[in-house]
């Protein structure tokens, strides 16, 4: 285990099993329909790449990048779009693919923004969820693994842009935060 890590919170095996389950449900629900997976950057790309390879149907992929909250939670709900998708989504079935839902503000904002572009449908799929942190009501069609209110890294998730490459979802030793603040 990496020296900066405190513990593994969600193993790669558990992530894979849940991804298979979610992909099976998505394959069933979107059978015979168009599907555009929209990955939320940066963190969402790891999960998206695993998820799409387990989906049976045809699907297209695009990405959107939003400003991150850093280590604090912004409650304004205003999320800055840093990179927009370049697909015309009118008449398409959209699935927003996220690493983790925390307050829910990012996805709420993205949903509202993308809905103005007249997609046929729009749903959310996230591999991790911290329901105890939710500040807004969010309907999550494809909900992954619930985790407690702890800051996690790995499987796309970062702390100061590091640790995204870790295959498991882990917590960091407390001194790592102190050192870099
Ligand atoms: P929300 O808008 O509060 O739901 O925040 C969503 C985004 O914040 C996630 O997609 C992550 O990128 C980031 N985030 C929230 N909690 C954590 C965490 O514990 N570790 C790393 N990133 C996090
Ligand atoms: Mg994210």
Image: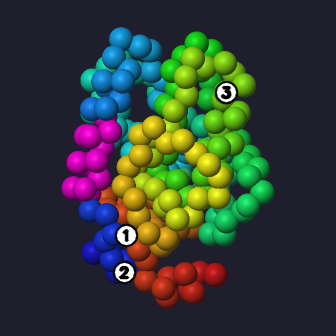
Q: CA distance from mark 1 to mark 3?
A: 34 Å
- Residue 147 or residue 6, whichever sits in front: 147
Determine the image quadrant of residue 2. Answer: bottom left
**Above or below 178: residue 54:** above
Q: Nearer the viewer, mark 1 or mark 3?
A: 3
State whether label 1 is within 8 Å of ligand 1: no
Q: Which residue is mark 1?
A: 170
Packing grade of label 1 (10 A; few <14, some 14-19, many >=20) is many
Q: Which residue is mark 2?
A: 6
Q: Earlier in the sequence, mark 2 or mark 3?
A: 2
Residue at position x 62%, y 49% from top?
137
Packing grade of label 2 (10 A; few <14, some 14-19, many >=20) is some
Residue at position x 42%, y 54% from top?
128
Horizontal side of 99 relative to 83 (left or right) equals: left
Q: Earlier in the sequence, mark 1 or mark 3?
A: 3
Res. 161 in view: no
Q: CA distance from mark 1 to mark 2?
A: 7 Å
> Where are the magenta residues, as a range?
12-23
Res. 27 in view: yes
Residue at position x 44%, y 15% from top?
34
Residue at position x 64%, y 81% from top?
181
Does dot 1 land on a helix, a strand or a loop? strand
**Above or below 43: residue 32:** above
State whether label 3 is within 8 Å of ligand 1: no
At which x and y percent is residue 18?
28, 47
Q: Which residue is mark 3?
A: 115
Label 1 close to label 2 by CB (< 8 Å): yes
Label 1 close to label 3 by CB (< 8 Å): no
Packing grade of label 3 (10 A; few <14, some 14-19, many >=20) is some
């Amino acid at each position: 285990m990496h020296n900066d890590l405190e513990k593994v919170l969600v193993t790669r095996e558990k992530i894979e099993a849940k991804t298979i389950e979610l992909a099976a449900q998505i394959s069933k629900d979107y059978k015979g329909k168009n599907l555009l997976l929209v990955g939320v950057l940066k963190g969402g790309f790891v999960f998206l790449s695993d998820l799409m390879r387990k989906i049976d149907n045809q699907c297209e992929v695009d990405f959107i990048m939003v400003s991150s909250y850093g280590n604090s939670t912004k409650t304004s709900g205003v999320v800055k779009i840093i990179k927009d998708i370049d697909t015309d989504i009118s008449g398409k079935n959209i699935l927003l693919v996220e690493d983790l839902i925390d307050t829910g503000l990012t996805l709420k904002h993205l949903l509202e923004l993308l809905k103005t572009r007249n997609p046929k449908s729009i749903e959310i799929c996230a591999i991790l969820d911290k329901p105890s942190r939710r500040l807004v009501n969010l309907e999550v069609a494809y909900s992954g693994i619930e985790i407690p209110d702890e800051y996690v890294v790995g499987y796309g998730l970062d702390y100061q842009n590091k640790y995204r490459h870790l295959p498991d979802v882990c917590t960091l030793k407390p001194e790592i935060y102190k050192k870099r603040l």
